[in-house]
Image (cartoon, rainbow, N blue to C red):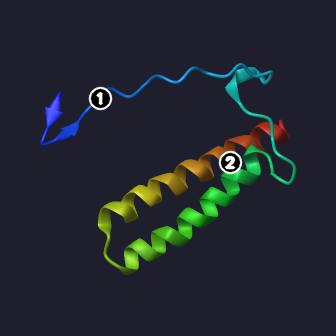
Amino acid sequence: MDSGGVLVTKPKKRKRAASGARGGSRPEEPGEGGADEAVAFIAEQTGALRKLAERHKLDVLHYLLGMTKLEADEHLRLRTKRKLS
């Protein structure tokens, strides 16, 4: 279909590469931490970004980053609770 001189096409579907990892997760690269470390990093960074959004009165971003931080914190809390059991 022509749209203002630009040809619009459907995106091509990419085939999934077969991997030896179960559950669709990729193997960790050397130097990478596990999922817990990633979630802790995300929680820390979203906290800092949330403060920045608040300072600049970016209300929707402030809210969304707050929800992201809550989700990351909850994930860590439940993960720790399971490890203690």
Occupied quadrant, residue 84: top right
Q: Nearer the viewer, mark 2 or mark 1?
A: 1
Residue density around tag 2, few if under 14, some if 14–19, many if 20 or more, within 10 Å: few
Q: Do the residues labelled 2 and 1 touch (CB within 8 Å)?
A: no
Residue 9: give its label: 1
Quadrant in the picture for the C terminus: top right
Q: Is residue 80 left or right of residue 1?
A: right
Quadrant in the picture for the N terminus: top left
| Furthest residue toward bottom | 55
Residue 48: give its label: none
Task: Give the residue drawn at x 81%, y 51%.
Answer: 33
Which amino acid type is shown beneath numbered disc 1? Thr
Residue density around tag 1, few if under 14, some if 14–19, many if 20 or more, within 10 Å: few
Question: Closer to the N terminus: mark 2 or mark 1?
Answer: 1
27 shown above or below 67: above
Mark 1, secondary structure of its residue: loop
Which amino acid type is shown beneath numbered disc 2? Arg
Q: Which one is nearer the viewer's eye here, 25 or 13?
A: 13
- Percent across and percent down for residue 14 are 52, 24
- Percent across and percent down for residue 66 are 46, 59
36 shown above or below 14: below
Q: Mark 2 points at which residue?
A: 77
| Furthest residue toward front | 5
